[in-house]
């Protein structure tokens, strides 16, 4: 459960879940040891771990921790006791569909276990973790194959190893494209208010000796106008059945600007991010966070006293603005309901 780049956002060591604390990157590389399900839920909610695939993996290990504790409490009633823990994990981040996808997989196993649940559940959590890394590598190759030589790319937020089991979705494509030589310029916007682009994406790329140029979101149009960018490449926290994409706030603006300047939009996400039970983007719940994240930066107030703030974490990019969705099962060009359904049946 590692990758050649050495970035491990989630790891299981000595019967303990360890999460790379992404709140303190890039200044500090620090792991938190989580030994209770409450700690895991809090870490997901408080952005210690973020990115839909990584959240799902962390939640799967969280179920292992919870089942171990509940089985210790009662070898006969542990399944009943576990239900509250599953609900606690499910409520941690409402938009990222991988969270409930992973919890459902773990819950399906729980129903058939009669003895100590830890060995079976740990094997499944490890499988989810390993399969995510493999899927990222497959998506990296598929996405890079669509990019013409000597291309520049822009990415938003962080959809790299830090947001997944390893390697990354959007950054997986960028890594593969850089290695094959088709990508020669990489741009990343800062991504306010948590600065995932500046703190995380730039840090990841520099670990691989991939040069990156940062810009504020307000400069995206000016960048695209220069002709240096041919693809806008992002990840996703949930994709609806019709191809609408929920991703970090600002993705919609980037897609609109890309369409205006004739730049292609690529969304890279595993099929676990596609929610066939959600018909369209209007049906996706959008998480809002504390207004203070907008009103302050690094603990210092930056707004006039008395100002209010609106802080949605995600936005919805309509399928009509997406040129291609890249998954581990294949690509969907000009996505719509029929094409997404065909992909999921494959």
Image: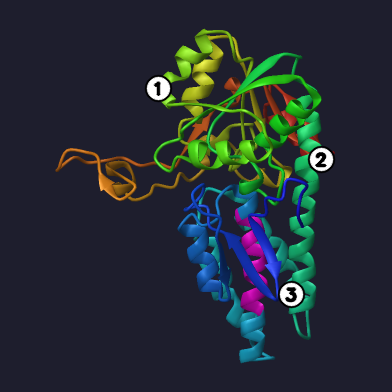
Judged from the image, the secondary structure of the residue bearing numbered disc 3 is loop
Q: Main secondary structure of the magenta part?
A: helix
Looking at the image, which residue sits at the far right? Answer: 346
Answer few, some or many: residues within 10 Å of disc 3's Cα (few below 14, many 20 plus, some between 14 and 19): few
Q: CA distance from mark 1 to mark 2?
A: 40 Å
Which residue position holds label 2?
Answer: 345
Answer few, some or many: residues within 10 Å of disc 2's Cα (few below 14, many 20 plus, some between 14 and 19): few
- The span picked out in magenta is 55-67
Q: Residue at x 17, y 38 (%)?
A: 304
- In the rendered image, which quarter is residue 305 located in? top left
Q: CA distance from mark 3 to mark 2?
A: 26 Å
Q: Residue at x 51, y 49 (%)?
A: 25
- Circle nearer the N terminus (3, 1): 3
Judged from the image, the secondary structure of the residue bearing numbered disc 2 is helix
Q: Residue at x 76, y 54 (%)?
A: 2
Looking at the image, which residue sits at the far left? Answer: 306
Judged from the image, the secondary structure of the residue bearing numbered disc 1 is helix
User: Where's residue 313, x and y in %?
Assistant: 44, 42
> Height in image: 113 above or below 87?
below
Colour scheme shown: rainbow
Say which of marks 1 and 2 sits in front. 1
Q: CA distance from mark 3 to mark 1?
A: 50 Å
| Pointers 3 and 1 in contact (C-beta within 8 Å) | no
Q: Residue at x 78, y 29 (%)?
A: 179
Q: What is the number of the mark on residue 111?
A: 3
- In the rendered image, which quarter is residue 269 located in? top right
User: Where's residue 15, x and y in %?
Assistant: 70, 76
Residue 107 included in the magenta stretch of the image:
no
Which residue position holds label 1?
Answer: 218
- Circle nearer the N terminus (1, 2): 1
């Amino acid at each position: 459960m590692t990758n050649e780049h050495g970035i491990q956002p989630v790891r299981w060591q000595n019967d303990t879940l360890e999460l790379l604390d992404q709140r303190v990157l890039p200044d500090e590389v620090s792991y938190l040891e989580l030994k209770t399900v409450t700690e895991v839920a809090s870490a997901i909610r408080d952005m210690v771990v973020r990115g839909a695939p990584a959240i799902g993996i962390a939640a799967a290990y969280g179920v292992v921790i919870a089942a171990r504790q509940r089985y210790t409490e009662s070898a006969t009633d542990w399944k009943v006791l576990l239900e509250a823990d599953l609900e606690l994990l499910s409520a941690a981040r409402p938009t990222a569909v991988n969270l409930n996808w992973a919890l459902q997989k773990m819950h399906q196993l729980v129903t058939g276990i009669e003895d100590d649940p830890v060995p079976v559940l740990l094997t499944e959590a490890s499988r989810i973790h390993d399969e995510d890394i493999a899927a990222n590598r497959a998506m990296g190759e598929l996405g890079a194959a669509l990019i013409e030589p000597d291309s520049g790319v822009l990415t938003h937020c962080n959809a790299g190893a830090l947001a997944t089991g390893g390697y990354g979705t959007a950054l997986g494509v960028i890594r593969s494209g850089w290695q094959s030589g088709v990508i020669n310029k990489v741009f990343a916007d800062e991504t306010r208010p948590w600065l995932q682009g500046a703190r995380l994406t730039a840090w990841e790329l520099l670990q691989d000796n991939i040069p990156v140029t940062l810009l504020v979101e307000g400069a995206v149009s000016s960048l695209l106008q220069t002709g240096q960018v041919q693809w806008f490449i992002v990840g996703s926290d949930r994709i609806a059945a019709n191809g609408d994409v929920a991703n970090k706030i600002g993705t919609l603006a980037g897609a609109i600007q890309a369409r205006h300047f004739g730049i292609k939009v690529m969304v890279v996400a595993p099929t676990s991010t596609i929610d066939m039970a959600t018909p369209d983007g209007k049906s996706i719940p959008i998480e809002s966070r504390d207004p203070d994240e907008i009103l302050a930066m690094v603990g210092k107030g930056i707004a006039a006293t008395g100002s209010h703030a609106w802080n949605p974490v995600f936005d919805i990019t309509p399928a009509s603005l997406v040129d291609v969705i890249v998954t581990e099962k294949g690509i969907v060009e000009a996505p719509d309901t029929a094409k997404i359904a065909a992909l999921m049946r494959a």
